[in-house]
Image (tube, grey):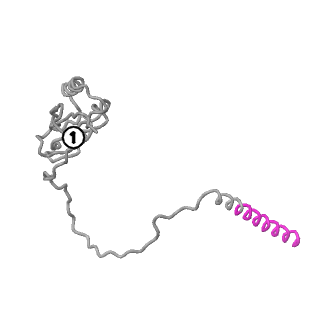
Amino acid sequence: MLKALFNTVILLVLLLFNVALFTWCVNQLELDKTEPKKVLITSVQAKSDFKPIAKQVITQRPIRPSKYVVPSTHKGQPIGRLHLQFKPTNTKLESEEASKLEDILKKLDINSANSVLIFSGASTSADNIPAPQISKLRVQTVARVIYPHTQTVKMFYRPSIKEGTVVIEFFEPLEK
């Protein structure tokens, strides 16, 4: 009986050894196929002398008009200029503003060689807080309408323009 128990234990140890050896071989074959993982951040201990400040509310700084003048990429006067007026917090074109834009695009016969500059004025949110995101969305809405006609569209933010106004200037192609 002792011999049977001894043989059973040896068979179990050999079986476990074979399973471990088989698992190790399979893992080695899989590791050869894949590249080793790169570690971008290693464990680092750092000491900081930063002292936390009591609760402080961080607000957006007011947008101030810059004195920087954007250099003109076009020579001469624009062949067409259009002023679109948006409601205070509206970012989409109204039907009458969209029809004005479509009419001028048809009248000027704009093609892919022409270029367009879009200037957006300041805007405020519902809480009467300056919101340049609204101006950006307005310009992008207008650019989506113009883009099928000409792919040369440049957008600028000009706080000096009247609030809610978007100015579109159409230019002839540059002579090379």
> Which image quarter is the N terminus in?
bottom right
Residue 155: say if magenta: no
Closer-to-camera residue (146/84): 146
Locate residue 56, reporting x and y percent.
20, 63
Q: Magenta part of the protein: which range?
A: 1-24
Quadrant housing residue 20: bottom right
Residue 17: say if magenta: yes
**What residue is at 80 percent from the left and 67 percent from the top?**
14
**As drawn, 133 above or below 8:** above
Q: Name the residue beneath numbered marker 1.
A: 74
The chief SS type of the magenta part is helix
Closer-to-camera residue (25/143): 143
Q: Mark 1: which amino acid?
A: His
Quadrant housing residue 110: top left
**As drawn, 2 above or below 145:** below
**What residue is at 20 percent from the left and 26 percent from the top?**
104
User: How many numbered dots are placed on residues in this image?
Assistant: 1
Residue 112 horizontal side relative to residue 55, left or right: right
Locate residue 70, reporting x and y percent.
19, 48
**What residue is at 17 percent from the left and 31 percent from the top?**
80
> Which image quarter is the C terminus in?
top left
**What residue is at 76 percent from the left and 67 percent from the top?**
17
Closer-to-camera residue (56/103): 103
**As drawn, 133 above or below 6:** above
Label 1 neighbourhood size at 10 Å, few (<14), some (14-19), many (20+)?
A: some
Residue 35 horizontal side relative to residue 99, left or right: right
